[in-house]
Structures are given as C-alpha cells and as structure tokens.
C-alpha cells in the first residue's frame, strides 16, 4: 500500500515552533486529478485533521496549496512541479500556523471551562478562517453561563499554565482524567494543561496558555438538539475589536451620537423609518386606488368581453398585481392585461374577475415564445416576463388578434 511505503517524520510534533527546515524529497507525483504533490522525508507542515486546517507555505519557493495525510503518507500539494527534490527547503506560513495554535489551544481551554463549571460536554470542533465553533451537548444556553465560562477561560490564560504534549500507551492514558474517550488505542498523544484539562489530541498548540492571549465568545445558535458556540482567540480578537471599533466610530459620526447612546439613537431612527415606510405605503395604496379608478374609465371590448389594457414603464410586477386586484375585486366582468417595459425586460400581469371569461394561463402560454419568456399561473390570473424584443403595445395587439382567432375562454 502506498501509505506504508513512505513514513514521513513529523517535525511539528517534535517542536511546533519550527518555521523552516531542510530535508529531502522521497517522491514527486501527480494525483488522479493532475495535482502535483511531494512526499518528504520529514516535514514541519501540519496536515488537515482533528478540526484543524493544514499549514501553508513554500517548498523551494513553490507555494504549498494543501497538505493531507493518508495512512502514514503526508502529501504536500504544490502549485507547480519542483525542479529538484534532492534537497528541499520548507518554509511555514508562521502567521497562519501560530493563529491555528492559538485557536486550537483556546478551544481546549474553553471546552474544559464548560465542563468544569456546568458539566456541558463538547461534541465537535471546527477551526474556520474567521472564527471557530464548538458544538455543545445541550439544548439551550444563557448569557450568564457564557459570561462565567468566558471569564474562567481567560483566567486560565492569565495564569500562564504550561501546555504539554506527550505520547503514552493505552494503559498510561488510563491514569489521566481524560475529558473525553480516546478514539485510538495506539500512538496516543495527550495535550495537557496541568490540573485543568487532559485530552487526546493531534493538533499543534503553544507552550503555555498565556500565548493564547485572550478568548472571546461571539454568539451561539441552536443546532438540532445541540448548541453551536462561535468564538475567537488571540490575534483574531484584536482584528475583531478593530473592526467593531471602526464600525462604531463610523456609526457615531453618522448618527452624531456617542458610542454608549448608539442603541437609543438607532432605535429612534428605526422607529422613524418604520413610521415613514407606513406613511409611504398608505400613499402608494391611495395612488393605486386612484389609478385603478382612472383605468376603469378606459374599458374596451375584445371578442365580446370587457378589457382594460395598459402599458407601463419601469413598474414592478408587484404593483401591477395589486393594481389588477383592485380592478378585478369589483367583479365587473373585466379582463385585465398589464405590460411593463422595464429596461431590457418585458413583464406582464394578466387577470380577470369571476364574471369574465378569458383563460389567462392559456394566453400567457401563447405569448411567452414571442419574447423568449417564462411564466405561468391559473386560468384567472397569470404573469411572466421575457426579453424586450418587441414593444409592450405590440404584445397587447398580438393578444387581441389571437383572442379573435383562438378559443381563449375559461371553459
């Protein structure tokens, strides 16, 4: 098996702070999709696994795009083929690596705080590009619980406790008060924060809790029978704080209010906008009712049926639908044909009341091919749209001609 042919030494387990290394390549090849990958004699690149993304960086100056482990074979997928793999210099993207170390160690600390204070178990962890998540075995949370857990986690960080990693046998592992059951029986690696957290883990971590710097819980949401908590650690907290500070500063300037008054001023603004929106909606309703009364004065007759036809410019379909309802709800045996010329599109609404007879669904189906359009509905109300290949008036003329030659009644 290919995976057992090469056993790469994992330098990231010897020292997670290795940023550069020199080794030799064992193989350079392409996978089934044509991507080039390199297998090294030893590597400081951490492969994707355990909720932690892989390291990135370069090999002999060529970008490493992804690192994966299959069996004991670690593949470094590169941007292009290396000229020579006899001597390979690897350089880790240290900013990314240390960020991952902070987030992963922060997750251990936060998870242990949930268990220590409230006996809430973590069932999964994801380290994302912008934030991290843990899924908790509980159906609901409170702000009081989150506050206490966050406080405890940051106290552990300030205590500057060591973070130790050690390889143990299965029997040796049983001597520790592990936070969760081990998923392996061999090659067991424990990550230990003395007198606080003992956990089987294959990720990279800093040497002490102080290097996590700080943990901030952002929010939480329900996920089926669990709760998903979003959080960030270390430098991500500074970035998040900078973004929030910039936003609050901009809002303060826009609203001419100090930061502590922004919620009050914003609520007043929202209430004012709601009142204004309601006033506008009432005015629009009045305008549409007036417009409907005016259109009722222009009734024509097609094939013995009363018809109101009109072409609008830059009118949303929703307004045409409401206007048609205002007319048809009067039950005056009227068929309505509205077309809107909206830029490079033609949109239309056809409707009738219960005393009129045209089959609007059949008419729409007949007219759609003319404008390469889509649409549908029922025999009493249908709508659609397509390309503005012809003018709206031409569509209405074509509908009138078709009604005179085809059976477009509702029966």
Image (tube, grey):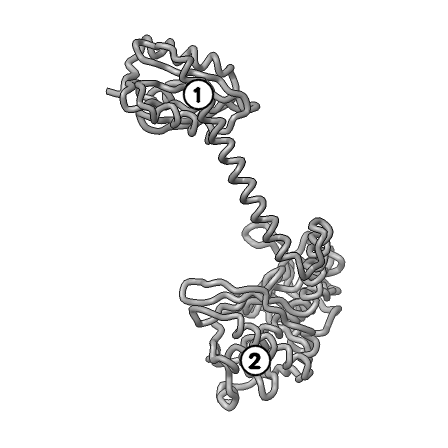
Mark positioned earlier in the residue sequence (1 or 2)? 2
Q: Which residue is mark 1?
A: 338
- Residue 31 x %, y %: 57, 54
Residue 149 in the image: above or below residue 322: below
The residue at 66%/71% (across/down) is: 102
Label 1 to label 2: alpha-carbon separation: 72 Å
Image side of residue 235 versus residue 338, left or right: right
Quadrant of the rendering where the C terminus is positioned:
top left
Image side of residue 204 versus residue 302, left or right: right
Image side of residue 304 versus residue 370, left or right: left
- Residue 286 x %, y %: 47, 29
Image side of residue 280 versus residue 369, left or right: right
The residue at 49%/88% (across/down) is: 174
Residue 209 in the image: above or below residue 81: below
Q: Which residue is mark 2?
A: 189
Residue 318 in the image: above or below residue 164: above
Q: Quadrant of residue 213?
A: bottom right
Secondary structure under the numbered disc 2 in the rendered image: strand
Residue 388 in sight: yes
Tell me if mark 2 has few (under 14), some (14-19) or many (20+) residues whose alpha carbon lies within 10 angstroms of its own: many
Secondary structure under the numbered disc 1 in the rendered image: strand
Tell me if mark 1 has few (under 14), some (14-19) or many (20+) residues whose alpha carbon lies within 10 angstroms of its own: many
Q: Quadrant of residue 193?
A: bottom right
The residue at 31%/9% (across/down) is: 303
The mark tally for this picture is: 2
The residue at 50%/29% (across/down) is: 316
Residue 287 in the image: above or below residue 335: below
**Front in this rendered view, residue 338 or 376:** 338
- Residue 117 x %, y %: 52, 81
- Residue 97 x %, y %: 68, 67
**Front in this rendered view, residue 140 or 156:** 140
């Amino acid at each position: 098996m290919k995976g057992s042919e090469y056993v790469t030494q994992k330098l990231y387990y010897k020292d997670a702070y290795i940023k550069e290394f020199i080794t030799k390549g064992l193989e350079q090849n392409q996978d089934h999709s044509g991507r080039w990958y390199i297998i090294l004699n030893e590597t400081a690149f951490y492969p994707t696994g355990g909720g932690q993304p892989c390291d990135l960086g370069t090999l002999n100056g060529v970008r490493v795009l992804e690192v994966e482990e299959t069996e004991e074979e670690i593949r470094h997928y590169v941007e292009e083929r290396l000229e020579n793999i006899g001597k390979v210099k690897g350089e880790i993207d240290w900013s990314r690596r240390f960020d991952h170390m902070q987030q992963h160690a922060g997750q251990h600390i936060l998870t242990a705080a949930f268990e220590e204070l409230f006996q809430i178990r973590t069932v999964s962890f994801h380290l994302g590009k912008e934030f991290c998540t843990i899924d908790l075995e509980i159906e609901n949370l409170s702000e009081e619980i989150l506050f206490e857990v966050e406080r405890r986690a940051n106290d552990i960080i300030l205590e500057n406790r060591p973070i130790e990693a050690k390889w143990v046998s299965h029997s040796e592992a049983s001597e520790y008060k592990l936070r969760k059951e081990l998923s392996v029986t061999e090659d067991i690696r424990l990550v230990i924060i003395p007198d606080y957290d003992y956990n089987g883990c294959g990720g990279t971590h800093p040497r002490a809790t102080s290097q996590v710097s700080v943990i901030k819980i952002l929010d939480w949401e329900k996920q089926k029978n669990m709760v998903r908590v979003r959080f960030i650690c270390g430098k991500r907290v500074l970035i998040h704080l900078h973004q929030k500070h910039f936003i609050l500063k901009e809002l303060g300037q826009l609203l001419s209010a100090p930061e502590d008054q922004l919620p009050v001023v914003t609520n007043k603004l929202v209430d004012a906008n709601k009142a204004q929106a309601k006033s506008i909606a009432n005015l629009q309703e009045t305008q549409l009712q007036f417009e409907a009364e005016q259109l009722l004065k222009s009734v024509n007759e097609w094939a013995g049926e009363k018809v109101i036809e009109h072409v609008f410019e830059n009118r949303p379909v929703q307004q045409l639908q409401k206007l048609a309802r205002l007319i048809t709800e009067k039950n005056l045996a009227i068929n309505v044909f509205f077309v809107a010329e909206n830029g490079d599109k033609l949109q239309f609404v056809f409707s009738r009341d219960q005393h009129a007879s045209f089959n609007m669904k059949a008419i729409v189906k007949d007219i759609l091919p003319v404008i390469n359009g889509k649409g549908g509905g029922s025999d009493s109300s249908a709508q659609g749209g397509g390309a503005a290949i012809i003018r709206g008036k031409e569509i209405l003329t074509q509908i009138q001609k078709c009604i005179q030659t085809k059976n477009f009644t509702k029966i």
